[in-house]
Image (cartoon, rainbow, N blue to C red):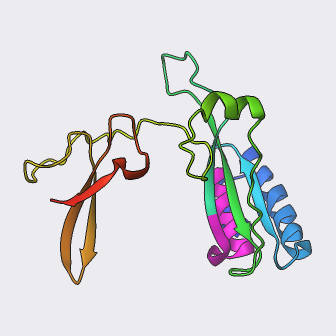
């Protein structure tokens, strides 16, 4: 694989980097536990070449996801698009037997107090109101009863499409304020 890349790209710093990474990826794959996974963080300059190497080493079937990491907000460069993100490739050693550990961190007490200020006493705990206004604003081309601030989705059933919208209360999505209706 590396010979093909060097033949295509020529001998330059990028192919030297890819050669160095190729050796390391082979070794990482060798020592990785069968339920293990690899997260490879790279910038957009080499990400497409590294994806080819990762597919060759881990197998395309073990590719799980490409994660785009926004590392900063927009810069004031008016002459071109700003470089604000990196790429993280997620590969597993085995197609169906990798271990997934959900990444969660509890909210601080001050965050909960400032954001989750409502409790209706039904035993489900605190909640917050949020704006669930559809970017669509309405369900165009459908009957006049469509919600002004509705969400639209199409449900397929036995080859027939049925469009549904949801009416949301002005305060957002909460309990019975959502009324699904067919359009």
Quadrant of the rendered image containing residue 90: bottom right
Can residue 39 be seen by looking at this rendering? Answer: yes
Quadrant of the rendered image containing residue 29: bottom right
Residue 145 drawn above or below residue 100: above
Q: Residue at x 54, y 17 (%)?
A: 77
Q: Please identify the dominant SS of the magenta region.
A: helix
Residue 62 drawn above or below residue 180: below
Q: Residue at x 68, y 35 (%)?
A: 112
Is residue 93 found inside the magenta-colored segment of the image?
Answer: no
Q: Residue at x 62, y 47 (%)?
A: 125
**Residue 26 x/y as whole percent:** 84, 70
**Residue 22 x/y as whole percent:** 80, 63
Residue 136 shown left or right of residue 160 in the figure: right
Residue 73 shown left or right of residue 29 in the figure: left
**Residue 127 x/y as whole percent:** 57, 42
Q: Quadrant of the C terminus?
A: bottom left
Quadrant of the rendered image containing residue 58: bottom right
**Residue 79 x/y as whole percent:** 48, 18
Q: Quadrant of the N terminus?
A: bottom right
Nearer the observer, 178 or 25? 178
Magenta region:
47-64
Q: How many marks?
A: 0
Is residue 49 found inside the magenta-colored segment of the image?
Answer: yes
């Amino acid at each position: 694989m590396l010979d093909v890349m060097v033949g295509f790209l020529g001998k330059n710093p990028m192919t030297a980097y890819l050669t160095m990474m190729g050796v390391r990826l082979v070794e990482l794959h060798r020592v990785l536990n069968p339920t293990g996974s690899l997260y490879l963080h790279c910038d957009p300059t080499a990400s497409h070449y590294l994806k080819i190497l990762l597919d060759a080493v881990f197998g395309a079937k073990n590719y799980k996801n490409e994660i785009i990491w926004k590392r900063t907000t927009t810069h004031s460069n008016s002459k071109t698009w700003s470089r604000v993100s990196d790429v993280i490739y997620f590969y597993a050693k085995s197609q169906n037997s990798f271990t997934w550990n959900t990444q969660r961190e509890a909210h601080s007490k001050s965050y909960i107090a400032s954001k989750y200020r409502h409790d209706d006493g039904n035993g489900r705990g605190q909640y917050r109101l949020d704006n669930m206004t559809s970017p669509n604003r309405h369900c165009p081309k459908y009957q006049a009863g469509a919600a002004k601030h509705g969400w639209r989705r199409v449900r397929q059933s036995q080859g027939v499409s049925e469009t549904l919208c949801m009416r949301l209360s002005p305060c957002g999505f909460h309990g019975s304020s959502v009324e699904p209706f067919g359009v």
